[in-house]
Structure formats: C-alpha cells, structure tokens
Image (cartoon, coloured by chain):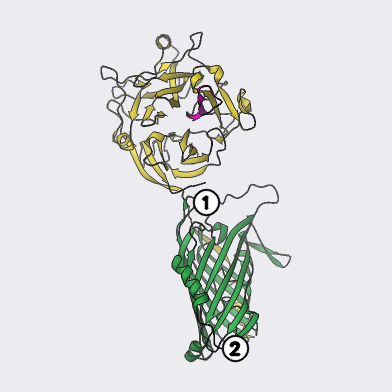
Chain colours: A yellow, B green
C-alpha cells in the first residue's frame, strides 16, 4: 500500500530544457583592429596580398579617393600587425602620389577613354606567390559596367614585381597579349605558395589555388602548379590530381575545398594551412594538410567575423602569413559594413595547440 | 595529478596488513556502495525511461576481500556500458522505451581498491561505515551511425573523457530508521588524454528504513570538472548536479530503486558540450552494501 502511494507520487512528466551549447575552440582572437584608411582614401576594402618572408604587399583593384577620384591598382607594404593597425601607406610614385602597382596598358586605358557604353576594363588582382624576392601576381582582366554589379571576366594574366619595384610588369605571350589564360582554362584566383619540388625545373614549383563556380553554392577549389622558372609560360601550368599527380585537364583536378569566399594557402607548422572565409556563416575556417597540393581536411571553425548589414557578405578574408605574431597563429583581413565595427578588420588568431 | 597517483598507490599498498585476515573471493564491492548514487557514473543496472532512453549495464564487484579485526580491504573491478538516445523518449516499443535520435555510447571500466575502517566506524555507531578508496578508470564515448545512409555525426569538437584516477572517502551513518551516506570524490585526469584535468564531486544519499522493505530515499550528486586542452582544443569546465527521489524496494542483495530524477549541467558522453536541465523517471537494480 505504501509502495503504491510512493509510485503514484512519482512525476509522470519529463522534459529537457537546453541551457547552452558550449564550444571547444581551437584558438583565440588575440587582436582585432579596424585598419584606418591611408591619407587620401575614404575607406579600405579587403585587400589581396603577396606574402613576402618579412612583409605583406596588400593590393586593391580600386579604393575610393577622398577627392572623388578612385585609386586604381594601388598597393601598400605592411611589415607588421602594429603597422597595419596604425594605418598602411599607399605605395607612392616619385612625386608622392599613389602609384598604380598594377596598371592598364596605354591601349587598354585608351579603350576605356573612348567607350561610351558605360563599360570599362579593370584589373582585379587575385593573389600570387613570391620567390627570391620577386612577386608574381595573378590578375583578372574584367569588363565592368554599366551597372555596379555587371562584370565579365575576360581572362587571367600575370605580372612580376621585381624587388623594390613599385610597378608590377605584366607578362605578355609571344604575340604580345597579356591575357595568358581564358576564363575556363585555369583558375588562379586565390594565391598560393612556392614549394620545393625536385620534379620541377629549378627545383621549385608554384602552387596556386583557384576556385570556380560550377553551380549555385558550389565552388570547388583546385590547385594549379608550374615550375617557378616557367611561371611566365602559360603552357607550363598544370592542375593537381590525387590520382595522377600533375595533369593538364582542369576537369581532372581534385577539389580540395569548396569556398565561395576567400581562401589562402600558406605554410603552417611544417605543413600547410588553407584559411577560408565562410561567407554564409560569417566565420573563418581553417583546413590543415601535410602537403600544399592535397590532403586538406574538413573545415575547422576558427573565429567569427562581424556580420555585414547592408552587404550580402563580408568581403575578403585573405590570410597574411608574413604578419603572424607567432608561428602558431594566423592573421586574416576582411571588410564588413556591420554596425558593430565597420571597416577593414585585421584579426590575429592564436591556435592553442596542435589542432586536427 | 602526481599527488593523486601517489595517494592511490599509498592507499593500495602502504596500509598495514591485518593481523588475522579472512580472505574471500568475489563479493559485494564496497562497504559503502556506489549503487545508490545519483551520479551518471554509478555502476548499476539502470533504465532511465525519460526524458531520454538511457540503458546502463554496469556492475562493481570485489574480486578479493581481505577482512582483518579492525579493517577490511576490497580489490575489485567496475564496468559500465551506457546507451543513451540522443533524442527524447517518444513512447514504448517491445516493452522498452523508444526514443528518437542516434544511440550514444559511453563505456568505462576501472580497477579499484577500498579500505573500510570497520572498527573506527563501529565505535561511531552500530551500522556505521567509513571507507577510503581509489580507482583507475578508463572511459570512452562513441555513437552508432545511421543504418540508412545518413551523414555521420561530427564529434571532433566534443569533450572526451579518457583516463583518470578517482580518490574518494565515503561514510554511512545510521540514526534510528534513518540512514545517511555520503561520498566526497576527487578526480584527477591523466594529462593529454581527457578534456578535463580534475575536479571534485560530492555524493549524498538519505533513506528512511522505517517501512521495512519499502524505503523512500533521496540521492544527490554534484561534480565539477575543470576543463583542459586536448588535441588543440580548449574545453571549458563542466558541471552536473543531479538528484533522485523515489522508493527503494530492499532485499538482502540490494535494492530495486524506482525514482524521479532531475539534473542540471553538462550532458555526459559525446554530447558533453550541451548544458541542459532535465526531469525524468527511471528504475535501477542496485547491489547493496558489503557486510563488514
């Protein structure tokens, strides 16, 4: 009788109320500054960059000038996190005016001047590699306009920036054309690294990442490679397949990531790190691999970025290996119009340990 | 950590041997059993019906017992296998609870040594017990993937409990029809093998024996595990406060415990990052206390 009473007193309801979902981060943001624009510039957009051993060269297709004149093809040397957060200075010409590191040819400029359809040619730097002090910068030749979202990529070219030079010299083929690749021939739009490779002429190979849209929300990324000694030769470029090694057909390349946003390949801790901007999640992810060509694992969340307000997505997200405050850290730039902290952010993120 | 291991070894080997010892094989695990505990780690046969279907097959037994005139030693093994539904209980099927979600597994096994200070406890009161113990435990967490081709569960960010040493001191006091038992625990995890590095725990159990076979009880348990870094991830502290109240149907072997349970804190096992509060009911088969 007593037992029955106790049994009846047991509550029949059961419930679960979630209080919180915790995280186990792989690191922490140790610095996040909004980079002030240089003199004569209204605002900074997210740069692409060439990563030198001791400094980073930031490059922009265009920055809005304070006088209403756009600054096209400009760049800035950044030697440290502190320097960047204090405000970069644009590379200047002999007269002190901002210099175009990447510039249209006189013929292209003349073509722009003569057009009346609202369209113009523009050079969009996409990243590259540095070897022996020379920067090799890939760029897309884009026809923009008449609307702000109208853009047609005409092809990809390469320019070489000699040590201490202020102008990147565009490479031309034997026929004098600076467009070295048609848009569907190679994707070289995410920059890369130079690796030692005994099979490559000169013993060094440039490995360049590229992502191309094949369908909505589907942007497979592959790596292309060429011996550094033959970077100016479009025919020397191949793509990497995990099954066959370096192959010619782009469709035979192995996708190592799917990144509609920025993606940067860089050395890290004896291996390589692909840092990507997850634009739909407003988050920076990292992928590790022991090799630059393949083996990148799944995306691992690193840190959140300030989500945009009016913009659809944050811009940029390149990683600047030259600015890392410690070997086990990354430095990422991105631009946002989020009301919490609009502008160009430079974020230093320290890894706790040997994350996988 | 080093201190915990030293303490465990000292407990196991440094105490003097009883002058006149009676040795027996395979017996009840401890003078102060853990089977009434509200801890999720209690090695019992347990069926938590709600809010989730949690089936635990666990046991703790003394492989050898050495009884002296003033104290007794027990050396044994504890094992536990726990299957937990990821989702909540939705009903009954095949007599057992049915629940949604993947099946989450948690398994642990431990070697332990327990020293009961029988004479000292007897001086305190008739039926009282006092016991010190140490165990070395391994735990791992798993899940059963879909049988229908669904994607797997990414658990790389979840905490992991690996190997630890647990030191505890437990006591039982009897006053009239009331029995009060308690246990204070200290966890020390081996470095680099768990998401935690240590923490304390406290276990209490109060029951009224005035009705004879049917004994109302309440059990409470709290633990705090201090987070550590594992495989490059930094884990936050985890806690769990859990209470059971019900009736124990007592026998010479132990109890059938029918109870309501409530808890707040981190989930156990592979969902350890989730902090939640739950209410539910369950039933347990619990082995009782070892005789002196």
- Going by the picture, which residue comes out furthest to the left? A95
Give the chain letter at badge 1: B
Give the distance between the C-alpha atoms of the residues marked 2 and 1, in whole angstroms. 49 Å
> In this figure, which residue is indicated by the disc labeled 2?
B211
> In this figure, which residue is indicated by the disc labeled 1?
B157
Residue neighbourhood size for the residue with mark 1, other residues' Cα within 10 Å, grouped as few (<14), some (14–19), many (≥20): many
- Image coordinates of residue B277 in percent, x first then y, are 51, 64
- Image coordinates of residue A179 in percent, x first then y, are 50, 15
Where A103 sits versus A329, above or below? above
- Image coordinates of residue A241 in percent, x first then y, are 61, 30
| Residue A197 lies within the magenta run | yes
- Chain-order first, disc 2 or disc 1: 1
Depth check: A87 or A77 in front? A77
Q: Which residues are magenta?
A: A191-211
Give the chain letter at badge 2: B
- Residue positioned 54% across, 65% down in the render: B278
- Image coordinates of residue A339 in percent, x first then y, are 37, 40
Magenta span: chief secondary structure: strand
Image side of residue A4 versus residue A151, left or right = right
Write down the quadrant of residue A102 in the picture: top left
| Residue B250 lies within the magenta run | no
- Residue positioned 28% across, 35% down in the render: A86
- Residue positioned 57% across, 82% down in the render: B216
- Quarter of the image for the C terminus of chain B: give it: bottom right
- Residue positioned 33% across, 32% down in the render: A79
What kind of element bears circle 1?
loop
What kind of element bears circle 2?
loop
Q: Is residue B193 visible?
A: yes
Depth check: A342 or B113 in front? B113
């Amino acid at each position: 009788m007593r037992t029955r009473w106790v049994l009846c007193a047991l509550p029949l309801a059961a419930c679960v109320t979630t209080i919180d979902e915790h995280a186990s981060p792989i690191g922490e943001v140790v610095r996040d500054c909004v980079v002030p624009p240089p003199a004569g510039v209204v605002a900074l957009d997210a740069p692409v960059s060439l990563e030198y051993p001791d400094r980073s060269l930031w490059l922009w297709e265009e920055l809005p000038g304070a006088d209403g004149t756009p600054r096209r093809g400009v760049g800035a040397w950044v030697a440290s996190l502190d320097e960047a957060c204090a405000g970069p200075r644009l590379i200047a010409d002999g007269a002190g005016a901002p210099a175009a590191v990447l510039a249209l040819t006189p013929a292209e400029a003349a073509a722009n001047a003569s057009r009346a359809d609202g369209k113009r040619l523009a050079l969009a730097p996409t990243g590259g590699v540095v070897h022996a002090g020379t920067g090799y910068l890939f760029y897309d030749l884009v026809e923009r306009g008449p609307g702000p979202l109208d853009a047609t990529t005409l092809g990809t070219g390469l320019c070489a920036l000699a040590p201490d030079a202020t102008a990147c010299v565009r490479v031309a083929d034997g026929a004098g054309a600076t467009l070295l690749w048609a848009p569907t021939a190679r994707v070289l739009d995410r920059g890369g690294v130079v690796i030692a490779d005994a099979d490559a002429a000169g013993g060094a190979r440039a490995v360049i990442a590229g992502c191309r849209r094949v369908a909505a929300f589907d942007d497979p990324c592959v790596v292309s490679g060429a011996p550094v000694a033959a970077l100016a030769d479009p025919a020397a470029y191949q793509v990497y397949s995990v099954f066959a090694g370096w192959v010619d057909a782009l469709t035979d390349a192995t996708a190592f990531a799917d990144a509609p946003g920025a993606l940067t390949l860089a050395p890290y801790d004896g291996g390589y790190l692909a840092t990507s901007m997850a634009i739909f999640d407003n988050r920076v992810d990292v992928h590790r691999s022991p090799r630059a060509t393949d083996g990148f694992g799944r995306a691992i969340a690193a840190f959140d970025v300030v989500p945009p307000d009016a913009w659809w997505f944050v811009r940029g997200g390149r990683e600047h290996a030259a600015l890392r405050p410690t070997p086990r850290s990354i430095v990422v730039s991105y631009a946002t119009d989020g009301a919490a902290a609009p502008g160009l952010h430079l974020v230093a993120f320290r890894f706790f340990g040997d994350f996988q | 950590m080093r201190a915990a291991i030293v303490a465990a070894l000292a407990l196991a080997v440094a105490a003097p041997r009883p002058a006149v010892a009676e040795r027996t094989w395979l017996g009840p695990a401890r003078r102060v059993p853990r089977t009434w505990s509200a801890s999720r780690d209690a090695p019992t046969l347990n069926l938590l019906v709600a809010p989730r279907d949690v089936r635990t097959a666990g046991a703790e037994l003394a492989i050898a017992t050495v009884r002296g005139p003033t104290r007794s030693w027990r050396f044994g093994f504890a094992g536990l296998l726990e299957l937990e539904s990821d989702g909540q209980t939705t009903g009954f099927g095949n007599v057992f609870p049915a629940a949604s979600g993947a099946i989450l597994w948690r398994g642990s096994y431990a070697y332990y040594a327990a020293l009961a200070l029988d004479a000292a406890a007897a001086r305190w009161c008739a039926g009282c017990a006092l016991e010190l113990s140490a165990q070395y435990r391994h735990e791992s967490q798993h899940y059963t993937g879909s049988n229908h081709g669904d994607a797997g569960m990414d658990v790389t960010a979840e905490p992991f409990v690996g190997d630890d040493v647990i030191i505890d001191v437990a006591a039982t006091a009897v006053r009239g029809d009331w029995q009060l038992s308690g246990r204070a625990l200290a966890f020390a995890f081996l470095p680099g093998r768990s998401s935690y590095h240590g923490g304390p725990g406290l276990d209490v159990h109060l029951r009224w024996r005035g009705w004879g076979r049917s004994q109302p009880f309440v059990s409470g348990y709290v633990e705090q595990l201090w987070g550590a870094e594992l495989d490059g991830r930094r884990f936050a502290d985890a806690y769990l406060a859990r209470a059971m109240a019900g009736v124990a149907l007592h026998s010479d072997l132990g109890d059938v415990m029918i109870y309501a349970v409530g808890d707040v804190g981190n989930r156990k096992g592979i969902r350890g990052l989730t902090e939640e509060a739950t209410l539910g009911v369950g039933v347990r088969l619990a082995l009782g206390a070892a005789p002196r």
